[in-house]
Amino acid sequence: MLKRLLLRYLLTNLNSFDAAQFTFSTNITIDPTIEHSLRVYVSCDGDGNRNNDTLDIRISDVYNLVVSPYT
Amino acid sequence: MGQGSKRITIKNVNIEAGRNGSTTSGIFIGGSTSATASGADNDSIVIDNVNIQKAYYGIYAYGTSANPAKRIYITSSFGSDSTDNFITQRGVYLYYANNILVNYNHIYNLTTSSSTPQGIYLYHSDTATVMNNIIHSVIYTGTSGYGGHGIESYYSNNALIANNMIYDMQGDGWTSITASSMAGIVIRYSNENKVYFNSVNLFGDYTRSNATITSAFFADANSSELDVRNNIFANSMMNTDNIGAKSYAIYSLAAPSAYTFLDYNDYYVSGLQGVLGYFNSTDQTTLASLRAATGKDVHSINVDPEFTSNTDLHTSNSDLSSMGTPIPDIDTDIDGDPRYPIPSIGADEVELLPINLKLASIDNTIHGCEYSGNTPVKFTVVNMGTTQITTFDASYILDAETPVTQIFANKFK
């Protein structure tokens, strides 16, 4: 338990040029038959550059990717 | 220097060729039979802190195909503020010259009425390193459809063109850039050229009745394996005689597949004739369309670089800070200032902001057997600022649904 908390502590204190991966506590539900768009953005008080805060991805062909190997 | 000149240093001198209206050179490295003949075995020549003016070519090195000149290191000044003493056609002209270093030169006020002037011209010259040069005011003054080129690589493979500032390319323009209209960096018939961290700014009005084009960066259809990253390509030129003229940040006749890398650049155009890019024989007017056309430039941006002025390409625009990607062995900028681990775009490294959190990637791996329908959203952030970050908000939106926002904070606070 302590190890887990410590890990979280390290992950959320970011020094210059530190990188860390995070996961939202809620999941998304993907329909494999259609294309989805997913936008993620971050916000930090005092952030002087808002041009690097947002990314978009498209999630598509999930159905084919899942099914194709087994058909 | 005639054929067979080796291990020669020319240092701390001023040179005038005496005439600049014909084929003279401040320093000629070639054959022995004439001042324009090719010559073999001219190797290991250093030209350091030399000022050259009043010449047709500042330096002209002309080796042979079988035996190119090798290891010529050039760090000097080419040009004059006096009209009578201008260099006219080319500042540095390398023809059959390999393993050349052209570093920390100031090349300026090249003015001619005969054809396209070039600041640095690589012709059949492989493995040249062209770094940390300031090249400006390369001007064609005639009326036959030409314009200045800052750096041109022609039949020259494996060139490294990095950390250069290029501005004020002038002329009356033409409807193509190949060997003609104004451009900052030109790549033709050349492979494996690497173009990193350059700042190019084309500006000013000119007149020609044709629908002319100009571009900060140009690559022809005969070049391949190009690597173009971390550059600012800006263009605000205006042909006041033809409203159909176009001013591009990047104009590529090379297909997207000709680029090993094309990313982390800032493309910026302004004015009525500005067009962001040209790919696949089509104008690409937005960064989104440029990305769609090329499948590249995912991390490139479209922001005003806010140069100190049109003729001083330093900048403190934080939009450029930490927006580049590290390039091995390029760890300083044009001023010798260190590059940060995640560098700025352009020749001048921008000071870090106090707080700058970057969303680096969305890390979902939704494929194959990992698909479950109910999927976590993962992402990676990087602290690009100087201040430690202990808390931030993050949100996601799936298919334009209501945003889901979460606070990520230090759990011990």
Image: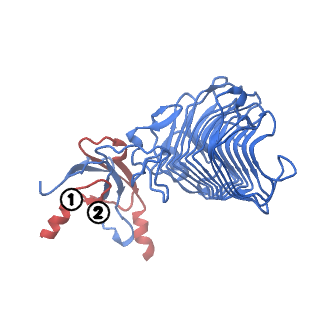
Foreground residue, B276 or A70? B276
- Callout 1 environment at 10 Å: few (<14), some (14 to 19), or many (20+)? few
Kind of residue at disc 2? Thr
Q: Is residue B32 above or below residue B111?
A: below
Q: Relative to the observer, which residue lies in front, B134 or B308? A: B134
Residue B145 image point, x, y percent: 74, 32
Find residue B140 and report its horizontal and vertical position in percent: 71, 31
* Drawing shade for chain A: red
**Residue A25 - label:** 1
Tag 1 secondary structure? loop
Distance in Å between CA atoms under marks 2 and 1: 11 Å
Q: Chain letter for mark 1, please.
A: A
* Whether residue A39 can be seen here: no
Tag 2 residue: B375
Q: Is residue B308 above or below residue A5?
A: above
Residue B131, given in percent of the width and then of the height, sits at 57, 49
Q: Secondary structure at mark 2?
A: strand
Tint of chain B: blue
Q: What's the chain of the residue with tag 2?
A: B
Which circle, 2 or 1, is nearer the viewer?
1
B106 or B172, nearer to the observer:
B106
| Quadrant in the picture for residue B138 | top right
- Residue closest to the eye, A37 or B308: B308
Image quadrant where residue B158 sits? bottom right
Residue at coordinates 43% horizontally, 45% vertically from top-left? B349
Q: Left or right: B147 with respect to B380?
A: right
User: Would residue B168 be seen by someone viewing this image from the given angle?
Assistant: yes
Total numbered badges shown on the rendered structure = 2
Circle 2 Cα neighbour tier, 10 Å, few/some/many (<14 / 14–19 / ≥20):
some
